[in-house]
Image (cartoon, rainbow, N blue to C red):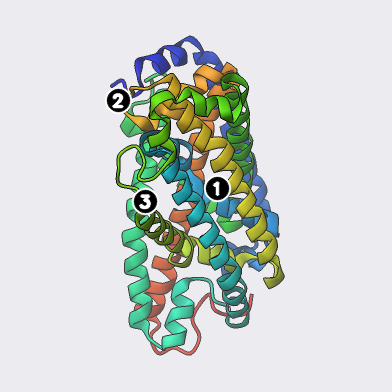
């Protein structure tokens, strides 16, 4: 099965040795980080769940950044900008600003409650506040529905990428299985600390490549003004509401932004666990500022220019989700183009390991507590860490 457009398939085939070597190097670093984190793992529940509440603000920032960005940020968002235009960038940036404001407000409060009462999941806080095991079970149900769908989507995307990067040697189904096994072993072996360390490496890699991509586009396309001029007759529709497809009105933009920001932060169990894992409540201002900077650079310099310049170079594509890959092999040196494809895989892995971790934690901890420990005064995992 040939998943990629013919142009990329030919380039992958012509540079197969370089791509495979880069992929193997990435997995070697992956294994090293897993091994290093496992050496630091303390044999107690709190360390596995929330890294003993001792993660530095830079690590917390990058694990949030890499988890939220995922393969969607590397492929889906440039594709959406290619399809919709600037209104989608406004949507993304508005959501980012709202999410950071919510983090500044809720982060310190969730951290204080988590530290005081040894909470490790949303179900801990909500169940104790309402004195209801039913609430805990609701959090489990919501998490299963939310996380399973997202994990399946990420695994499928990872399987597709492995199929592509291996030159069709690894079938799609086997690619999904390989990614699933690798991520599960990483989550089981390293706990949240290992996930956060890997996310930090992946986040730096993603940030570097998106910034490099954007600057390469500016150098090739004559700067931002040159890219905008290159849009020609579609420029006015591309840069104004309601966008290229005529549906991104101001009310829709801000409605989607609010929904996405609340969903990715307030309602996201993985975000709660990262708030619990920070070293102190004073860190959240620094986390918010750095997170805002990372997302702004990623979308303003990276994904926006990829989508806009992609419109110029490839005005007709069958699947806009491939525009970042098509453009990477056009404007980046081949090593960095192959590294960009691997960075998409890294983003997928960062999202998958985070959601798999929280799914396991919530199902085992909250479901066990609600069903088997109802009425007990002390529950395994809630003792002082």
> Which of disc 3 and disc 1 is earlier in sequence?
1
Q: Which residue is mark 3?
A: 150
User: Which mark is nearer the camera, 1 or 2?
Assistant: 2
Categorize mark 3 by other alpha carbons within 10 Å: few (<14), some (14-19), many (20+): some
Residue 309 visible (yes or no): yes
Q: Nearer the viewer, residue 151 or 57?
A: 57
Name the one closer to the observer, 236 or 275: 236
- The residue tagged 1 is 66
CA gap between label 1 and label 2 equals 28 Å
Q: Secondary structure at mark 2?
A: loop
Residue 347 coordinates in the image, percent (x, y) = 51, 41
Which residue has dot 2 on it?
Answer: 318
Q: Which of the 4 quarters of the picture holds residue 375?
A: bottom left
Q: In front: mark 3 or mark 2?
A: 2
Residue 104 pos. (x, y %):
60, 68
| Residue shown at 34% from the left, 61% from the top | 144
**Residue 96, placed above or below residue 307:** below
Q: Residue at x 63, y 60 (%)?
A: 288
Front residue (pair 146, 308) = 308
Quadrant (top left, top right, bottom left, bottom right) of the N terminus:
top left
Asked if residue 110 lies left or right of residue 9, the reply is right
State the CA–CA distance, disc 1 to disc 3: 15 Å
Q: Mark yes or no: residue 22 visible.
A: no
Secondary structure at numbered mark 3: helix
Point out residue 57 in the picture as x, y percentages from the top left corner. Answer: 69, 59
């Amino acid at each position: 099965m040939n998943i990629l457009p013919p142009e990329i398939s030919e380039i992958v085939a012509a540079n197969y040795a370089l791509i495979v070597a880069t992929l193997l190097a990435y997995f070697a670093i992956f294994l090293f980080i897993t091994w290093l984190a496992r050496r630091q793992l303390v044999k107690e529940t709190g360390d596995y769940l929330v890294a003993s509440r001792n993660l530095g603000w830079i690590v917390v920032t990058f694990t949030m950044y890499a988890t939220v960005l995922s393969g969607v940020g590397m492929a889906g968002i440039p594709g959406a900008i290619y399809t919709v235009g600037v209104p989608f960038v406004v949507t993304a940036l508005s959501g980012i600003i709202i999410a950071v404001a919510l983090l500044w407000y809720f982060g310190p409060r969730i951290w204080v409650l988590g530290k005081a009462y040894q909470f490790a999941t949303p179900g801990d806080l909500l169940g104790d506040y309402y004195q209801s095991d039913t609430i805990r079970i609701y959090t489990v149900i919501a998490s299963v529905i939310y996380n399973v769908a997202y994990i399946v989507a990420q695994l499928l995307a990872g399987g597709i990428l492995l199929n592509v990067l291996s030159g069709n040697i690894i079938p799609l189904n086997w690619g999904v299985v390989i990614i699933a096994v690798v991520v599960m072993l990483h989550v089981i072996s390293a706990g949240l600390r290992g996930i956060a360390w890997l996310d930090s490496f992946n986040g730096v890699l993603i940030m570097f490549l998106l910034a490099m991509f954007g600057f390469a586009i500016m150098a090739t396309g004559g700067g931002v003004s040159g890219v905008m001029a290159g849009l020609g007759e579609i420029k006015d529709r591309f840069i104004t509401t309601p966008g290229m497809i005529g549906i991104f009105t101001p009310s829709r933009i801000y409605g989607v932004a609010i929904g996405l920001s609340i969903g990715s932060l307030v309602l996201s169990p993985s975000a709660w666990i990262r708030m619990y894992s920070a070293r102190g409540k004073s860190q959240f201002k620094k986390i918010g500022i750095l997170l805002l900077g990372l997302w702004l650079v990623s979308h303003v310099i990276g994904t926006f220019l990829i989508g806009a310049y992609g419109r110029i170079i490839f005005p007709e594509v069958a699947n806009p989700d491939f525009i970042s890959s098509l453009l990477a092999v056009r404007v980046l040196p081949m090593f960095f183009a192959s590294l960009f494809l691997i960075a998409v895989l890294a983003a997928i892995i960062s999202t998958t390991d985070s959601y798999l971790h929280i799914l396991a934690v919530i199902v085992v901890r909250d479901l066990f507590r609600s069903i088997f420990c109802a009425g007990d005064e002390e529950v395994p995992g809630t003792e002082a860490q």
